């Protein structure tokens, strides 16, 4: 997963744990396997096993969209002042 926009540091340890859970759920749903997941406050690393017919860019777009929306909904108070701005408060 690419680094967060503007390289700010919005990710906390509980958020990284949740990103791992979301990633595992999405990989299993698409037929892949998450082998390893770790990160820091400004980025996440994923090591995955992919089926050969999986469109990687389409999947990563889905993963980033899903994880962003779920994190904004579950950690609203933590991200209210981060780089995610108004998107977590329902604004585009």
Image (cartoon, helix red, strand yellow):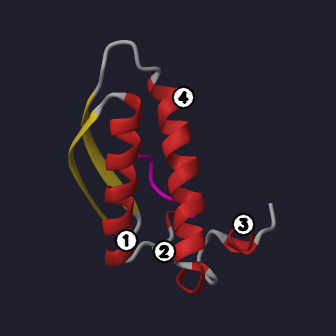
Mark on residue 51?
A: none
Q: Is residue 38 left or right of residue 11?
A: left
Q: Which callout, 4 or 2, points at the residue further toward the start of the chain? A: 2
Q: Is residue 92 left or right of residue 3?
A: right
Q: Nearer the viewer, mark 4 or mark 1?
A: 4
Identify the residue under disc 1. Answer: 41
Q: CA distance from mark 3 to mark 4?
A: 22 Å
Identify the residue under disc 2. Answer: 10
Classed neighbour count for the residue bearing mark 3: other residues with Cα under 10 Å, few (<14), some (14–19), many (≥20) = some
68 vs 35: above or below: below
User: Are the residues tagged 4 and 2 within 8 Å (C-beta)?
Assistant: no
Q: Which callout, 3 or 4, points at the residue further toward the start of the chain? A: 4
Picture residue at 58% right of the left edge, 86% below the top:
77
Identify the residue under disc 4. Answer: 58
Q: CA distance from mark 2 to mark 3?
A: 14 Å
Q: Which quadrant holds the C terminus? A: bottom right
* SS state under label 2: loop
63 vs 39: above or below: above
- Segment tinted magenta in the rendering: 1-6
Classed neighbour count for the residue bearing mark 2: other residues with Cα under 10 Å, few (<14), some (14–19), many (≥20) = some
Q: CA distance from mark 4 to mark 2?
A: 25 Å
Q: CA distance from mark 4 to mark 1?
A: 25 Å
In terms of depth relative to the viewer, which is nearer, 72 or 8? 72
Q: Which callout, 4 or 1, points at the residue further toward the start of the chain? A: 1
Identify the residue under disc 3. Answer: 87
């Amino acid at each position: 997963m690419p680094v967060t926009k503007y390289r700010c540091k919005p990710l906390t340890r509980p958020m990284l744990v949740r990103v791992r859970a979301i990633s595992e759920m999405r990989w299993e749903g698409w037929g892949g396997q998450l082998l390893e997941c770790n990160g820091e406050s400004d980025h996440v690393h994923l090591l995955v096993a992919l089926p050969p017919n999986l469109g990687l860019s389409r999947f990563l777009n889905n993963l980033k969209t899903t994880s962003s929306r779920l994190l904004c909904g579950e950690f609203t108070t933590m991200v209210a002042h981060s780089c995610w701005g108004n998107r977590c408060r329902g604004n585009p």
